[in-house]
Amino acid sequence: MRYLMTTRATDTAPAPDEKLYAEMGAFIEEMTAKGILLATGGLEPGGIRMTSSGDEITVTDGPFTEAKEAIVGFALVEVRSKEEVIELARRFRKIVGDGVSEIRQVFGP
């Protein structure tokens, strides 16, 4: 089962320090070694929105949400169960501190 784990921006997040980088690096290294982590990365705050209505397609530059609601990072993982991805997300939140993450199952090939 594949899941996309995302994390939102927060006003209260402390500035990253060496401890955070070390813990996150070890976590990513562990998931990679186990074959769980398929992709990870940060996301630009703006983005592009495409809206279609009939034959008309409108392209609009972002940002589109309040900064505190913006998705700032993601990890695509492959695990055996929903419980396993929840545990990974718990570990991630303990490393990065307060904030909001979302988990969504990815369907398809």
Image (cartoon, rainbow, N blue to C red):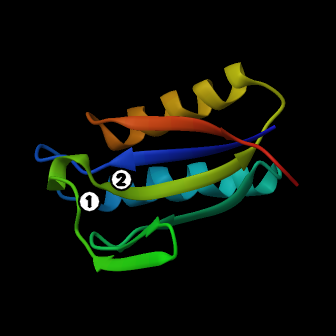
* Quadrant of the drawing holding the N terminus: top right
Q: Residue at x 66, y 31 (%)?
A: 85
**Res. 96 image quadrant:** top left
- Number of numbered discs present? 2
User: Left of 92 or right of it: where is 96?
Assistant: left
Q: Which label is found at residue 20? A: 2
Mark 2 is on which residue type?
A: Leu
Distance (Cα) linking label 1 and label 2: 5 Å
Q: Residues within 10 Å of mark 1 (few under 14, many from 20)?
A: few
Query: Considering depth in this image, is 58 or 99 the residue closer to the camera?
Result: 58
Residue extending furthest toward the top: 83
Q: Which residue is mark 1?
A: 17
Q: Secondary structure at mark 2?
A: helix
Q: Measured along the vertical axis of the image, is residue 100 above or below residue 82?
A: below
Across and down, in percent, residue 22 comes to: 45, 57
Across and down, in percent, residue 26 comes to: 57, 53
Query: Considering depth in this image, is 18 or 49 the residue closer to the camera?
Result: 49
Q: Does the residue at mark 1 contact the one at mark 2 (Cβ under 8 Å)?
A: yes
